[in-house]
Image (spheres, grey):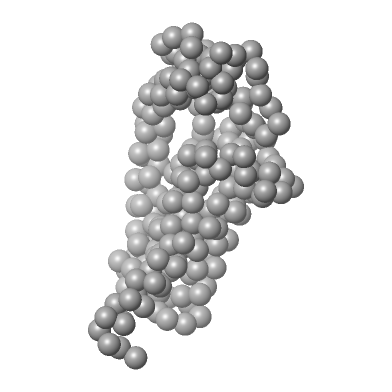
Amino acid sequence: MSDIHIPSRRAEKGAGCIRDMLPGVQNPELCEGDGVGGQGVLDGLLARARDLAPVALHAFAPNLLLTLLLALAVAALLSSSVQLRTWRLWLWLSAVMLPLPYTWTAARDSGTPGCHWGQPPWDFAPQAANPEITYNILLMVPAGAAAWLWPDGPRRLAALGCALASPTVIEFGQYVLPQLHRSCQAGDIINNVIGALLGWSLVAGGWAGVRIWRGAP
């Protein structure tokens, strides 16, 4: 944390609580007087977000642009082969590849919690209020929704299968590329899969509602 400016001692203690809030790990000294939910934690969270945001955007923005351009190039090359319009294929590829600029961008912090492949999903329940869980779910909603860009039938289901499989590929990439300084865990895969299924379900429900409203059989 030496490279992060902390505006006050209380914020420093709060940031320490955030940093050390791993399963079964807490630093009572850092949390003393403020508690895990105290004002110091909020100060620390805001301080970390303020100082890390420019760094994250600096790396994320160009990687996102490269990802979108790569998806466009692949779509232009393969659209005729897969018999799908270029813009549809580009949107689908972009949605599936959307997590890559963030998850495969090297983290600034040199430390990593490591990989927790064998940790049961219910062990993550105490961290349900963690905004990262919500983010991991929302991150894959476009991938599940974009499967509907494919024609009805096996190809649409295959597109959904790609969306459901991509979280495992992402976490495995973080595992074999330790230089990214990223954590990899089964909980992220579960949250990502939930997000993909949520995206699929939202479009399915919306489309069913439109058909009912139009009186279609």
**Residue that appears at 56% across and 21% down:** 35
Please tell me which residue lies in front, 189 or 13: 13
Measured along the vertical axis of the image, is residue 162 above or below residue 27? Answer: below
In which quadrant will I find the C terminus? bottom left
Residue 81 seen in this snapshot: no
The image position of residue 66, as x and y in percent, is 38, 46
Which quadrant of the structure image shows residue 70? bottom left
Which quadrant of the structure image shows residue 165? bottom right
Q: Looking at the image, how many numbered discs can be counted on the residues? A: 0
Measured along the vertical axis of the image, is residue 146 above or below residue 127? Answer: below
Measured along the vertical axis of the image, is residue 75 above or below residue 182? Answer: below
- In the image, is 23 to the left or to the right of 107? right
The image position of residue 199, as x and y in percent, is 43, 62
- In the image, is 36 to the left or to the right of 70? right
Please, which residue is most extreme toward the top here? 9
**Residue that appears at 62% across and 44% down:** 125
**Residue that appears at 53% across and 65% down:** 162
Please tell me which residue lies in front, 55 or 18: 18
**Residue that appears at 34% across and 45% down:** 65
Please tell me which residue lies in front, 166 or 194: 194
Residue 36 seen in this snapshot: yes
Please, which residue is most extreme toward the bottom here? 217
The image position of residue 29, as x and y in percent, is 64, 13
Please, which residue is most extreme toward the left here? 214
Measured along the vertical axis of the image, is residue 49 above or below residue 216? Answer: above
